[in-house]
Image (cartoon, grey):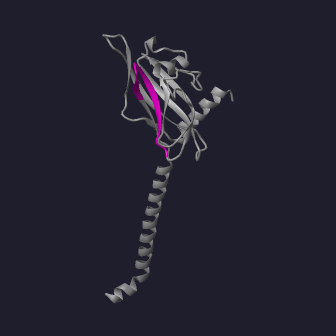
Amino acid sequence: MLQWLNQYSGALNALFNLGMVTIWLVYFNLVVAAYKRQRQTKLIIDCVQHGEAQDCVVINMSPEPVFLDAIVASVNHGDDKTYLQPARHSDHTDKSHENSFRFGALQQGKMTNIGSFDEILRESGISLDDGCQNLELTVVAVYGPEDLPVGCSRCFAIKRDEDTSKLSVSAESSISNQIRSRKDRRKLENLLRERNGF
C-alpha cells in the first residue's frame, strides 16, 4: 500500500490540489452570488383600498434607499396597446393622500402612495372609463451602487362591477416583476432619455 502511494504520490497530490481548488471556487461563487443577491434591488407595486378609491403603492425592500424617478403606464385596449408618457412630479394636492404622487428618495422598508389608478392614468391623459382591459405599471428608480436605472413592473386587471358600474383593479400576478437584466435596464435608461429630450 505504501509502495503504491509512493508510486502515485504525484498524481494523488495533483488530484488533491485540484479538489481543493474546486471546493474553493464553488465556495467563492456562493459568496459572490450571496453578495449580489443582498445588493439587488427589490421594489413592490401593490394595490390598496383607500376609501372608495384604489391606490397604487410602491414599497422598497432593497438593502438601501432608491430614488423614484418615473412611472410608465401601458394600457391595453383589446388587441391594441397604448404606451403612455411617464408620469412624474404631479401637482396633486389632495391632503387626504399624505404621500400621493411622491417621487424622490424612498428609504429601505418604506412605502409611498403614488396615487389612485384613476389619477395615474389621468396624469397621462387617459381615464379608466376608456374601455381598457388591463394596465401594466412600471416603476423606474435610481439605485446608488448601480450605473443604470432599476425598476419593477406589475400588471393589473381592470373590471367593471355589473351592479354598481364601478371599475375595480386587481393584480394579475402574485408578485412584481423585477427589472434587473442590463438589456431591460438600458431600455429604461433610453425611455428616460427620450422623456428628457436627450
Is residue 81 in view from this perspective?
no
Task: Residue at 57% x, 31% y: name it.
Answer: 103
Q: How many labels does the image show?
A: 0
Q: What residue is rendered at 46% in x and 30% in y?
A: 57
Image: magenta residue range: 47-62
Residue 88, position in %: x, y?
A: 58, 26
Horizontal and vertical percent position of residue 195: 63, 26
- Magenta part, dominant SS: strand
Q: Please tell me which residue lies in front, 54 or 123.
A: 54
Q: Which residue lies furthest to the bottom in this view?
A: 3
Left or right relative to 168: residue 68: right
Quarter location, residue 177: top left
Residue drawn where x is 56% and y is 36% of the image: 141
Q: Is residue 62 visible?
A: yes
Q: Residue at x 48, y 14 (%)?
A: 127
Image position, residue 91 (x, y; %): 59, 21
Give the vertical position of 13 relative to 91 (above or below).
below
Horizontal side of residue 26 vs 149, given as left or right: left
Q: Is 60 one of the magenta-colored residues?
A: yes
Res. 198 image quadrant = top right
Rendered view: 39 above or below 177: below
